[in-house]
Image: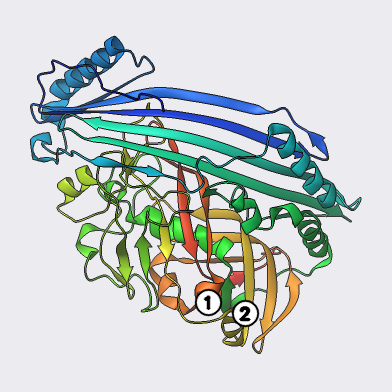
């Protein structure tokens, strides 16, 4: 393990300090149009020092993890804390001084993985199946494996080690004929992203997915456009993850609510006075922050400030209960939050981020979801998204749809799109699928912050039905 063993002593005149060590390695494999692409390898390693002094707080990062490098980073962080204390949004003397102790490990974190040659062999087989027709004009199969080790030590005696392994398999094909181009993928771009090992590939049937995805892309070439009008919509889990991410997750980030993202990625329609009373959705809407599901992408035991992570309801029976806010934002807002102060690497300070944000399953089977719809469309796999600066008005497009008439699934349609307003859309939630319809998905590239941070987020969700949605096809 990197950064193992005792640390040197630090003669630092400060109220509190912490060191967060991070080492992350990546191997990425790709076969495009049956041609193996160059192996992509990366290793990154460094430490972030955080210091509370004189009511201020400061950060300093370094790739020099020698005793001298650590002392210099802590000294720089202390200097920043003193220099900016009078401008601080909250007095650091009132902030928690965590002393966390414990560890965490991803499932199968030490289990064997395929060799590099075996990874390329697998991707070649999947790609060969995907490129099964001359109308398939582009196709690629990918897999990325990331290992990360993080150690957080604090001046109060905290010492936490967390070890992660992430696997991202992906498959996408593009079909073209007679002036029509359609794309189909396996759960969206990098939508399959979990902690663990090769069991993730089996969980999603990755090895046998090539021909099926290609055939669905070809089917879309001759499919009619999605009908337009106000109707019910059945969203599959691989579209629900985007809906949850953009119109629940980002609006509930407490630093965004307090205005921190205003000049970069927008603010939020949510205000602090809404918590405890605001009806965010119908009574069927239950959203949890849940870092305890082992295979989910953003599971962990402690956040990057050292707060122990526990499952909490953000929205219960449709009522907004708490924000996605870590210890510093909680102190600023006077609101209870969760353990979601997270940084994407050693050279970024933690900010309020989504982690595992899940929609709890209901009691309806998939057949019952379909049977509840007289006229509507089932939509799968996000392909486009647009949402305003307050994370309220949105417009999303999907790769594939199927018409539903009189409670029966009908023919496939292309270019299914829908739009709405977050504040109203979730109140139209009419049915929630049961645990059999739930999928554990997510995204490895959620962006936020200045300087920018791209972080891993998990979403577990069942299929859901929304009533009276504004739907439109590719001609609109």
Q: Is residue 213 left or right of residue 476?
A: right
Q: Is residue 259 left or right of residue 425?
A: left
| Residue 374 vertical placement versus 86 (above, below) | below
Looking at this view, is 449 or 417 the one in front?
449
Q: Which residue is mark 2?
A: 376
The total number of labels drawn is 2
Q: Using the numbered discs, state the Cα–Cα distance from disc 1 to disc 2 in whole angstroms.
A: 10 Å
Quadrant of the rendering where the N terminus is positioned? top left
User: Element type at marker 2?
Assistant: strand
User: Which label sits in the foreground, 1 or 2?
Assistant: 1
- The reply to whether discs 1 and 2 touch (Cβ–Cβ < 8 Å) is yes
Q: Residue at x 36, y 55 (%)?
A: 251
In percent of width and height, residue 381 lies at: 62, 60
In percent of width and height, residue 201 lies at: 64, 52
Q: Which residue is mark 1?
A: 465
Q: Is residue 319 visible?
A: yes
Quadrant of the rendering where the C terminus is positioned? bottom right
| Residue 119 vertical placement versus 45 (above, below) | below
Q: Is residue 15 left or right of residue 6?
A: left
| Residue 98 vertical placement versus 71 (above, below) | below
View extreme (top): residue: 68
Check disc 1: other Cα within 10 Å, few if <14, some if 14-19, many if 20+.
many
Q: Residue at x 75, y 31 (%)?
A: 37
| Residue 134 vertical placement versus 71 (above, below) | below
User: Element type at marker 1?
Assistant: strand
Looking at this view, is 280 or 53 the one in front?
53
In percent of width and height, residue 392 lies at: 41, 60
Label at residue 261? none
Q: Is residue 390 visible?
A: no
Sequence order check: which comes first, mark 1 or mark 2? 2
């Amino acid at each position: 393990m990197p950064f193992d063993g005792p640390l040197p002593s630090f003669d630092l005149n400060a109220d509190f300090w912490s060191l967060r060590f991070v080492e992350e390695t990546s191997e990425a494999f790709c076969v495009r149009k049956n041609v193996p692409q160059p192996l992509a390898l990366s290793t990154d390693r460094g430490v972030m020092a955080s210091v509370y002094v004189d009511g201020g707080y400061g950060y300093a990062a370094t790739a020099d993890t020698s005793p001298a490098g650590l002392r210099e980073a802590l000294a720089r962080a202390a200097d920043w804390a003193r220099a900016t204390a009078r401008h601080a949004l909250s007095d650091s003397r009132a902030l928690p001084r965590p002393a966390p102790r414990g560890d965490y490990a991803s499932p199968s974190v030490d289990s064997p993985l395929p060799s590099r040659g075996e990874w390329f062999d697998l991707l070649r087989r999947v790609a060969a199946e995907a490129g099964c027709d001359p109308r398939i004009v582009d196709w690629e199969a990918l897999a990325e494996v990331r290992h990360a080790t993080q150690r957080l030590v604090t001046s109060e005696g905290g010492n936490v080690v967390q070890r992660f392994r992430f696997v991202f398999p992906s498959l996408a094909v593009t079909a073209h004929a007679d002036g029509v181009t359609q794309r189909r993928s396996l759960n969206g771009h990098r939508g399959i992203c979990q902690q663990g090992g090769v069991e993730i590939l089996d969980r999603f049937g990755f090895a046998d997915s090539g021909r099926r995805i290609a055939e669905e892309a070809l089917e879309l070439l001759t499919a009619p456009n999605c009908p337009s009008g106000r109707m019910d919509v059945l969203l599959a889990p691989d579209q629900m993850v985007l809906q949850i991410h953009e119109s629940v997750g980002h609006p509930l980030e407490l630093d965004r609510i307090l205005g921190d993202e205003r000049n970069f990625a927008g603010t939020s329609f949510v205000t602090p006075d809404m918590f405890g009373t605001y009806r965010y959705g119908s009574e069927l809407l239950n959203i949890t922050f849940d870092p305890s599901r082992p295979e989910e992408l953003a599971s962990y035991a402690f956040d990057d400030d050292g707060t122990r992570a526990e499952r909490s309801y953000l929205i219960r029976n449709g009522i907004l209960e708490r924000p996605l806010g870590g210890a510093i934002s909680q102190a600023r807002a006077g609101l209870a939050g969760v353990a979601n102060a997270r940084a994407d690497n050693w050279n970024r300070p933690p900010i309020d981020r989504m982690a595992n944000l899940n929609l709890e399953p209901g009691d309806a089977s998939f057949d019952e979801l379909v049977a509840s719809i007289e006229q509507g469309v089932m939509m799968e796999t996000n392909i486009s998204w647009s949402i305003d600066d307050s994370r309220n008005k949105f417009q999303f497009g999907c790769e594939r749809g199927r018409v539903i008439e009189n409670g029966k699934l009908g023919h496939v349609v292309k270019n299914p799109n829908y739009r709405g307003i977050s504040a109203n859309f979730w109140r139209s939630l009419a049915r929630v699928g049961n645990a059999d319809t739930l999928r554990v998905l997510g995204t490895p590239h959620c962006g936020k912050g200045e300087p920018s941070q791209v972080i891993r987020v998990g979403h577990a969700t069942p299929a859901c039905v929304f009533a009276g949605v504004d739907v439109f096809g590719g001609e609109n």
